[in-house]
């Protein structure tokens, strides 16, 4: 079955750019939407944005000015860049397939903790 | 867009039923039958439990059910088991700008 794995630096300095990659295995990345979702410690989930395999994107309006997503179908990967980070961006970042049917996210990666600190 | 509103916590004894509410607006929950629910155990990734408001993915127990009335969606868990103790999140499509919004999460304690 499809599995997702996030990768990237676990520590990012304030004002710098957070960069994460999600590798999809067990199936093709093509013809699906793929999303990034984050969760600060002890808090709820926040949808960051989605990308289709054509490269079309939609972003959370609250993050739109700082978010860029891209996809590399040859590597079965998609990526997230979040610029000008602050401590408020410290969170576990999940990648997930979807939304499917404009509705659900499944499966999810295991998540990766990114800490913003000098 | 604002987060959907869920109770911070609910509890129940083994064998009982509980319901978790998820209140949105006429721009999200109220306008679409596009609510999903996720279960999250500590330190784990969320797991899809309900999609399209009331459908269960393969492998999810039929003790889990979903419904909607107006701007409020609900997740009901019947025959509570210890393994159901977890955080639960709802999620809804939020309209023409193609965005999605989650609830703040509900911690379920099985007494």
Image: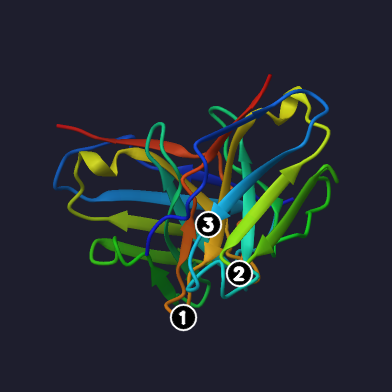
Chain containing the residue with disc 3: B
The span from disc 2 to disc 1 (Cα, nearest Å) is 19 Å
In the picture of the structure, the residue carrying the numbered disc 3 is B23
Whether callout 3 and callout 2 share a subunit is answered: no
Which of pointers 1 and 3 lies earlier in the amino acid sequence? 3
Horizontal side of residue B32 vs A88, given as left or right: right
- In percent of width and height, residue B6 lies at 52, 46
Chain containing the residue with disc 2: A
* Image quadrant where one finds the C terminus of chain A: top left
In the picture of the structure, the residue carrying the numbered disc 1 is B96
Q: Nearer the viewer, residue A14 or A23?
A: A14
Residue farthest to the bottom? B96
Q: Residues within 10 Å of mark 3 (few under 14, many from 20)?
A: many
In the picture of the structure, the residue carrying the numbered disc 2 is A32
Q: Residues within 10 Å of mark 1 (few under 14, many from 20)?
A: few
Foreground disc of the pair 3, 2: 3
Is the image coloured rainbow, by chain, by secondary structure, or in one colour? Answer: rainbow
- Can the viewer see residue B85 in this picture? yes
The span from disc 3 to disc 2 (Cα, nearest Å) is 29 Å
Whether the residues at callouts 2 and 1 have beta carbons within 8 Å, the answer is no
- In percent of width and height, residue A24 lies at 59, 53
């Amino acid at each position: 079955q499809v599995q997702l794995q996030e990768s990237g630096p676990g520590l990012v300095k304030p004002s710098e750019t957070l960069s994460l990659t999600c590798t999809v295995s067990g199936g093709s990345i093509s013809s699906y939407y793929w999303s990034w979702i984050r969760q600060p410690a002890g808090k709820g989930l926040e949808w960051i944005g989605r990308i289709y395999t054509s490269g079309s994107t939609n972003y959370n309006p609250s993050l739109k000015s700082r978010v860029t997503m891209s996809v590399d179908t040859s590597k079965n990967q998609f990526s997230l860049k979040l610029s000008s980070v602050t401590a408020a961006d410290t969170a576990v970042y999940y990648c997930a397939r979807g939304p499917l049917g404009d509705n659900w996210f499944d499966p999810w990666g295991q998540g990766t903790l990114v800490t913003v600190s000098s | 867009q604002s987060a959907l509103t869920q109770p911070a916590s609910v509890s129940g004894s083994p064998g009982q039923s509980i319901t978790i509410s998820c209140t949105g607006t006429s721009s999200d929950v109220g306008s679409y039958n596009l609510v999903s629910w996720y279960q999250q155990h500590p330190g784990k990734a969320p797991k899809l439990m309900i999609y399209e408001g009331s459908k269960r993915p393969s492998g999810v127990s039929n003790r889990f059910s979903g419904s909607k009335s107006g701007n409020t969606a609900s997740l009901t868990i019947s025959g509570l088991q210890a393994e159901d103790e977890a955080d639960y999140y709802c999620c809804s499509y939020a309209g023409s700008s193609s965005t999605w919004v989650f609830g703040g999460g509900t911690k379920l304690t099985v007494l």
